Amino acid sequence: VGALAAIAGSMFVKVLRSGEITMGSIALAFLLCCAVAVIFGSFNGTLVSVFKIQPMIATLVLYTCGRSIAYWINGGATPTVESPLITAIGSFIPGVPVPTPIIIVIITAIVLALVFKFTSLGLYTQAVGINQRAARLNGINTTSIKLLSFMILGVCCAIAGVIAVSRLSLINHETLLLDIEMDAILAVAIGGNALSGGKFKIIGSVLGAYAIQALTITLYAMKVPSTDVKAYKAIVIILIVVIGSPVVKAKLSQVWKNIRSGKAEKEAAV
């Protein structure tokens, strides 16, 4: 997702630098970077849904070469885009006390929540995540659902790339959302969404993202070296994955049943 955001951000900058920066040019640049991100998202989705490659392996392709592609888009340069309009996207709209990125996140979350709630897409996506074979037998096109999921992810990455570029007013392909993949995984897990697929809650992932950012800021405030922060995040991911594993869940469930049965026996004895 970091490399894809870098590609989208690079395209956003390239379009803006081709002419005067206005609301119209910003809208056009955003649409074009979304289109590019959807194309690359579809590439990942095709590897996963059509060629049945494991998602972790398939996405390594873009993870490896994505930032190079972002570098080529602007001819190997790291150009700037200085404009009050761009600054407003990355910080504050004059007269509005809420940071613009937060407003964008809220709008995006609401739109996606409404789409998943009032269309069959949410149900189909969860069905494929829970049991792909059963979903296929019930007439759901699992290939299309997976592909569409990666396309939606592309749009989200484009939004993240635009925000990141607007905050700095430039595109740095090597550092833009670098290593954000671990934070994304951790945000999903903290938000209560199963990494193996199935039922999901968008608001949970959003809250998980802010939780992991709060963890990062706290570690820095405690004078933890930046090189060690990733290790602490990795420990959190391991704990979440282990706690959420079927084996641990079964053990905890059995312990809880034993505790309840023990309480019931004591009450009966009294």
Image: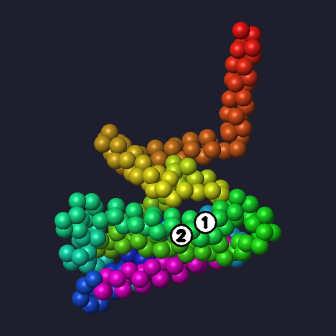
Give the class, few, some or many, for how many residues have Cα within 10 Å of label 1's Cα (few <14, many ≥20).
Answer: some
Q: Position of residue 228 (x, y in %)?
A: 41, 46
**Which residues are drawn in magenta?**
24-49
**In the figure, 55 relative to 141: above or below?**
above
Check disc 2 and give the amino acid type.
Val
Q: How many marks?
A: 2
Q: Nearer the viewer, residue 21 or 256?
A: 256
Look at mark 1 in the image and give the residue it sits on.
Answer: 122
Say whether residue 220 is visible: yes
Mark 2 or 1, nearer chain start:
2
- Residue 28 among magenta residues: yes
C-alpha span from label 2 to label 1: 8 Å
Tell me the residue at 70%/44% (across/down): 246
In the picture as drawn, the residue positioned furthest to the bottom comes out as 19
- Residue 61 among magenta residues: no
Check disc 1 and give the amino acid type.
Gly
